[in-house]
Image (cartoon, rainbow, N blue to C red):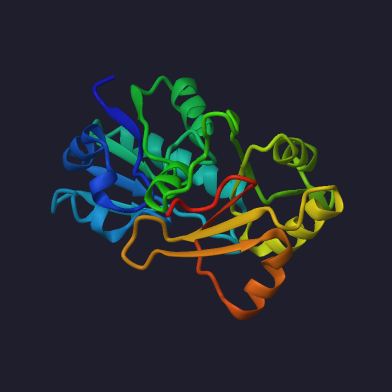
Amino acid sequence: MAHLVAIVGAGPGDPELLTLKALKLIQQADYILYDALVSEEILRLARTDAQCIYVGKVYHDGQDQSERQDQINQLILDLAARGRIIVRLKSGDPMIFGRGAEEIRFCKKNNLNYEVVPGITSALGAASIFGIPLTQRGKNSTVLFGTGHYCEGEFCDLDSFVSVLKSGSPIIMYMGLNKLIHLATTLVENGIAADVSVQILCRVSQPRQQAFETSLGGVGALLSSEKPPMPALIIIGEHVGRLR
């Protein structure tokens, strides 16, 4: 077990938000298998002789995601057989919508010596950067992370979204921008007030980051006049206005 596979969180994009351990491993790696959202600035921290291999998945890119993950797993196994340091570099944190669990199971199944290095997930990075409190004393003590994925034509966790919002706590949506109008309409139909705040935070921590602020009732009008770029994170809640 001379080889080492490191599943590393790269954070939301700004290289200064890397952990020291992540930086050390990136600089030591012989091979870096990186996702679509890993910034060029972070990749430039690698050794000049390191081989950086793109293994990203992008929304509607035509790839079969399960098949693509199998290919990534096989690549990890093939490179590990060479006894070199492999960094599997993921945006955000590997264990939050990052398929980290699948790659850990693969490493265990194949007796690969591995470690996992946490990163700042975009939800926490966005909240701090834009001054949006996710918890506040006397107001809420719960935060729900979710995605815009459908199950049989409806949002997979709709009941949970509604319950958390009615409690006064926020929900944070990854990968939900294309379905935000539908989500806003559905939440209002399920009893969430139309004036509840909606924050759309794009390219978090990167040079061209942008923020858009509206309400559930104003989502349609905002998206008809503005075109928030991806990747975008959405924070919805009664108490998620930006601190001023």
What residue lies at 48% left-to-right and 42% top-to-bottom? 133
Near-viewer residue (73 or 91): 91
Near-viewer residue (190 or 197): 197
Question: Quadrant where the C terminus lies?
Answer: bottom left
Compared across the picture, whether 20 is left or right of 118 comes to left
Residue 62, position as x, y percentages in the image? 61, 63
What residue lies at 60% left-to-right and 30% top-to-bottom? 142
Residue 44, located in which quarter of the rendered image? bottom left
Q: Is residue 76 above or below residue 206?
A: above
Residue 203, position as x, y percentages in the image? 42, 61
Q: Is residue 65 above or below residue 169?
A: below
What residue lies at 69% left-to-right and 67% top-to-bottom? 218
What residue lies at 37% left-to-right and 50% top-to-bottom? 129
Q: Is residue 176 above or below residue 8?
A: below
Question: Quadrant where the N terminus lies?
Answer: top left
Compared across the picture, whether 223 is left or right of 128 comes to right
Residue 128, position as x, y percentages in the image? 40, 45
